[in-house]
Amino acid sequence: SSELSTCNYIARKFGLRKGMFLGDVIQLCPDLVVLPYDFESFEEVSAVVAEVLHKYAGKYNGYVEVVSCDEAYVEIYVEPEDYTGNDIYGFLYSIAEEIRKDIFKHTECTSSVGVGQN
């Protein structure tokens, strides 16, 4: 009754998708290597990522809403004196890139960061 939690692009070529039962997965891809969860590492890395996000939220008078071990929302507030010129979006994208680099520096995990207005 186990489910596939994720799969790489090679496995997807065999028709595998997240959420499929492992019995069905093994029939589609008998040579699949299934790795066990490492919950302790997930928790450890998740805590480090949360620290990074809180650092940036604190710097820009915002807050962090953690949704799961690998997803969170960060709301920040910027003032015109925080950035130069009229390019607020360029400034926000640079913050997003800083966050990605900071996460990688502390965890060696890649991440994606989206920017939008509220």
Image (spheres, grey):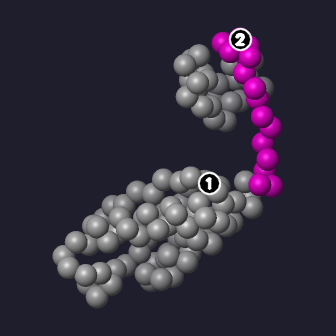
Counting from the top left corner in percent of width and height, residue 20 is at: 64, 25
Residue 68 sits above or below residue 52 on the image: above
Q: Is residue 39 left or right of residue 83?
A: right
Q: Residue at x 73, y 54 (%)?
A: 42
Counting from the top left corner in percent of width and height, residue 33 is at: 75, 26
- Look at the image and say whether residue 109 sits in the magenta stretch: no
Q: Which comes before the other along the chain, label 1 or label 2? A: 2
Question: Looking at the picture, which amino acid does disc 2 mark?
Answer: Gln
Main SS of residues in magenta? loop
- Which mark, by number, is residue 4? none
Mark 2 residue crowding within 10 angstroms, few (<14) / some (14–19) / many (20+)? few
Residue ID for mark 2: 27
Of residues 19 and 98, the one nearer the viewer is 98
Q: Quarter holding the N terminus?
A: top right
Q: Secondary structure at mark 2?
A: helix
Counting from the top left corner in percent of width and height, residue 107 is at: 66, 60
Counting from the top left corner in percent of width and height, residue 115 is at: 36, 61
Q: Is residue 21 left or right of residue 18?
A: right
| Displayed quadrant of residue 95 | bottom left
Q: Which residues are magenta?
A: 26-41
Residue 5 sits above or below residue 26 on the image: below
Examine the rendering and report whether any part of residue 66 can be seen: no
| Displayed quadrant of residue 15 | top right
Of residues 72 and 94, the one nearer the viewer is 94
Residue ID for mark 1: 109
Q: Residue at x 29, y 81 (%)?
A: 83
Quick check: marks 1 and 2 in contact, CB under 8 Å? Answer: no
Q: Total number of numbered labels? A: 2
Between marks 1 and 2 in the image, the one whose residue lies nearer the viewer: 1
